[in-house]
Image: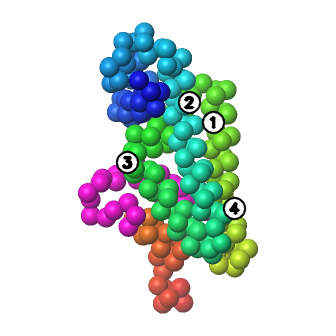
Amino acid sequence: MQRSDILQAAAQAFRQKGYHAASMQDIADAVQLQKASLYHHVEGKQDILLAILDHALDLLITDLEEVIVTDIPPDQKLRQAMHSYVGRLTQDADLAAVLLLEYRSLEPKTRAQHIKRRDHYEQIWRNLIKEGVEANIFQPVDEAVATFALLGVQNWMITWFKLGGPLTAQQLADRFCDLFLHGLLTTEGRAK
């Protein structure tokens, strides 16, 4: 039994039942261990939740940093970043749901540490927006508000996106990016 198997099973249980309703017995059953044996791999539910959240953020930060260091214009970086993020959200819906919804279940001290790491991730997005503004590719905007809007649109996919639906995750990423880069107004609409 590997710890990663336990974390994946726990993410699924937390997504399906919610952190508070999911029990250590649920997780043990999912990985076919006795509950007592589960404690040889993890300290408890808080340990599992933090490990899931850390793993999810590690993946997202690595993905985004790989885009940021490229020598492409900021609008193309934004498109690649959105593709990467939407890909992660839809690739492992259990992990994404726990990251976005269950961090509130962390104990206060641990939650503060997690939020600090999450803020670092958001800052990378803000820097991307700032880069686009400074390059005169994006219009001047409040980087924090723009980041919250970008992430918010993508984050809520966890509640409505279905694999096999009319659009793939990557097609949605393109549509989201087009909407942010071009807005809703036509050239005629902008002239009014």
The N terminus - image quarter: top left
Which residue is identified by label 4?
A: 127
Q: Amino acid at mark 1?
A: His
Height in image: 53 above or below 47? Answer: below
**Where does the image place residue 116, in percent across and percent down from the top left?**
68, 40
Which residue is identified by label 2?
A: 50
Secondary-structure class at tag 4: helix
Front one among 18 and 184: 18
Residue 140 in view in this figure: no
Q: Is residue 169 left or right of residue 141?
A: left
**Where does the image place residue 189, in percent across and percent down from the top left?**
48, 85
Residue at the right extreme of this rendering:
134
Q: Disc 1 and disc 4: Cα gap in Å?
A: 20 Å
The residue lying at 27 percent from left, 64 percent from top is: 166
Q: Work out whether mark 2 precedes mark 1 in sequence or the reverse, and give the earlier one.
A: 2
Q: Disc 2 and disc 3: Cα gap in Å?
A: 22 Å
Q: Work out whether mark 2 precedes mark 4 in sequence or the reverse, and give the earlier one.
A: 2
Which residue is identified by label 3?
A: 159
**Mark 2 and 3 residues: CB-CB less than 8 Å, in contact?**
no
